[in-house]
Every structure is written in C-alpha cells, then in structure tokens.
Image (cartoon, rainbow, N blue to C red):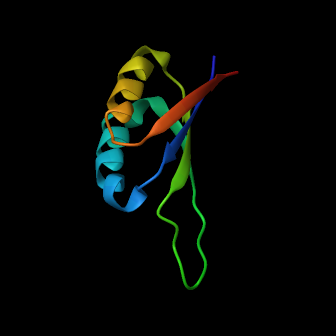
C-alpha cells in the first residue's frame, strides 16, 4: 500500500530546518517529496505544502508524531 502524506507548513522560513531534519531522519521510507509554495520575483510565500510518498509504513506513525511536534503543522494522509 502506498501512503501519501500532505503536510501544511504555515511558517516555512522558521520551521524548514526542523522539518528537513525530520524528513532526513526518515528518508529511507520516503520515495518522493514534492514541495509547493507561491513565489514570484518580488515575494516568496512563508507557507507551503509538502507531499511525501511513503514506501514503508513501519515507521509512518513515528514520522507523523515527529512532524506534528512542529508548531502549526497540519497533516493528512491518503492510502492508495
């Protein structure tokens, strides 16, 4: 079963180092990472959405718990 995590990061400038550390720790279970945020030549949005494709569900609950410790982050998952 494939799991897609959708993660909303409301303050990505200050939380991205913490987020990056967590997904690096769980990098072996992440097949695909897609980051979405609004940007143009004059502004770079301070919020974003990250999609993660998880290939090993054995560590998924630990990954979710670690991510939810970051202030303001929300997440949801889709099982395919």
Give the quarter of the image for residue 36: bottom right
> Where is residue 34 drawn, in percent x and y?
58, 49
Q: Quadrant of the N terminus?
A: top right
Most extreme residue toward the right is 80
Q: Position of residue 16 (x, y in %)?
A: 36, 54
Q: Is residue 3 visible?
A: no
Q: At x 52% / y 44%, what residue is drawn?
A: 8
Up/down of 21 relative to 55, above or below: below
Q: Is residue 38 left or right of residue 8?
A: right
Where does residue 71 sit, x and y in percent of width and height?
34, 42
Q: Quadrant of residue 73?
A: top left
Number of residue marks: 0
Q: Is residue 7 visible?
A: yes
Q: Residue furthest front?
A: 72
Q: Nearer the viewer, residue 38 or 35?
A: 38
Q: Is residue 15 left or right of residue 51?
A: left
For image coordinates 57% across by 29% down, the residue present is: 76
In the image, residue 26 sits, relative to residue 58, either above or below, namely below
x 32%, y 30%: residue: 66
Residue 60, image x, y percentages: 44, 21
Give the residue displayed 59% in from the left and 26% down from the top: 77
In the picture, which quadrant includes the C terminus?
top right
């Amino acid at each position: 079963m494939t799991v897609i995590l959708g993660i909303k990061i409301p303050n990505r400038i200050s939380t991205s180092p913490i987020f990056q550390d967590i997904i690096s720790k769980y990098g072996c279970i992440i097949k695909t990472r897609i980051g979405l945020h609004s940007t143009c030549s004059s502004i770079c949005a301070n919020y974003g959405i990250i999609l993660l494709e998880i290939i090993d569900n054995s560590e998924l609950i630990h990954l979710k718990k670690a991510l939810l410790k970051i202030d303001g982050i929300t997440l949801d998952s889709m099982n395919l």
